[in-house]
Image (cartoon, grey):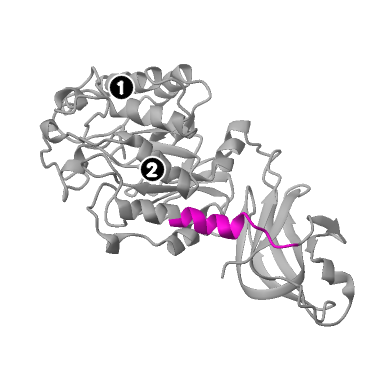
Amino acid sequence: MLKPTQQLLDFLDWEIGAFFHFGIRSFFPGHEDWDGKPMPAQAFDPVELNCDQWMEAAKAMGATYAIMTCKHHDGFALWPSKYTEYSVAATPFGGDVVRAFVDACRRAEMKVGLYYSPAQWGEEHAEQTDAEYDEYFISQLSELLTGYGKIDYLWLDGCGSEGKNYDHCRITAEIRRLQPGILIFGDVLREGADIRWIGNEEGAASLDNGCIATQIAFSVNDAGRAAEPRFMPAECDMRLRPSSWFDCKDNEGDLTTPEQLLGNYELSVGRSANLLINAGPNSRGLLHEADVRVMKAFGELWRSVYQHPLPYGKVKQEDGLYVIEHEDYHAGWGYSANVPVMNRVVIREDITHGQRVKRFRLWARLRVCKTDRVLLYEGCTIGHKHIAVLPMLAASRIELEILSNDGEPGILEMTAHCYK
């Protein structure tokens, strides 16, 4: 039985993260990844940079961790790196955006995540050998991992690294040496990663999304590879504005709605993965007001649904089932106006010693004829959290039947909710 580390259990408890794509691209609307168009450093000057505003919006959304693009595929470094001339040091701004971001995270009591694209376009490294590029890679990571205190999460983007021959073992060892306990996202370092990419940029996991990974997605250009089974939770990234990861101007018509984001929450956190929502600050260094409104509204929405369970008792075992009951269930046959109307069931499995449930069913005992039961839902894995989205139904009792499992299943919690 593959077991998670405490760090991986903690990661799943983070649940929602805020992603901030910010950099030289924020000053060149219309540019796209790998288009090779010049973006002079002199254009970078976020005169109103306010990472505290970013954190306020992230907290309102419900995020517990935040990640910023310290170096994207264009190679522009948001800190004054000694290993490139293409950084904030060569701009009118002249400051250190990574420092501003990390400090804001800590003031907001958010976990700190740093994004780094190992690959980049441009001529600067075109003639380098693999070993020389590894030195550049390690040198820049060393700056990020030694200059800003404890870093909780390193997000390594696989895009552009397809087929590249990095010294995976050496780079992983150096990261672990510099930041013991750090979590690493992505398969760039092969066996060195802790968190896997879900395989799309739409914030959605499959219904059968176990934490035991045997196939690991690499990038949008590479479907990934088979791997030895290991406990490796998934993260689902997505854009608040689907047209771009970076700022795409203050166009409210381009925004994902709070209701859509709730669906993404249910398709990610509700399928034992984390949800990472991106917002692109503008060239002034601020989030658009419309983005902030949506982030806040989404936070209010998911809390209203999932932080207020309906009045059923605690989960208990009975005749081989896990059940929750409303107090009127034992009143016998007959109508009861008190029985709740629900359309969501949240199940949490104890995965401390491994993920065990492989298939399950949810049944409901109804409001009047309580001896009869209706099959509501059939699912696969449960893991950290599974959210079953159902039609509206008045149920006096909800029953969880485990159909297939690897070892004794342990259900920590089962709650019912209603989204109207």
The residues tagged by marks 2 and 1 sit, at their Cα atoms, a distance apart of 21 Å
The amino acid type found where label 2 is placed reads Phe
Question: What label sits on residue 19 in the rendered view?
Answer: 2
Q: Which residues are magenta?
A: 297-311
**Which comes sooner in the sequence, label 2 or label 1?**
2
- Amino acid type for the residue under numbered disc 1: Gln
What is the quadrant of the N terminus in the image? top right
- Horizontal arrangement in the rendering, residue 385 relative to residue 205 (left or right): right
Q: Which SS class for mark 1?
A: helix
Residue 413 x %, y % = 72, 52
Q: Quick one: 86 or 185, which is closer to the camera? A: 86
Q: Can residue 239 be spotted in the picture?
A: no
Q: Is residue 303 visible?
A: yes
Residue drawn at 37 percent across, 36 percent down: 52
- Mark 2 or mark 1: which is in front? 2
What x and y, as percent, mark residue 35? 16, 45
Location of residue 161 by image quarter: top left
Residue 99, percent across and down? 34, 25
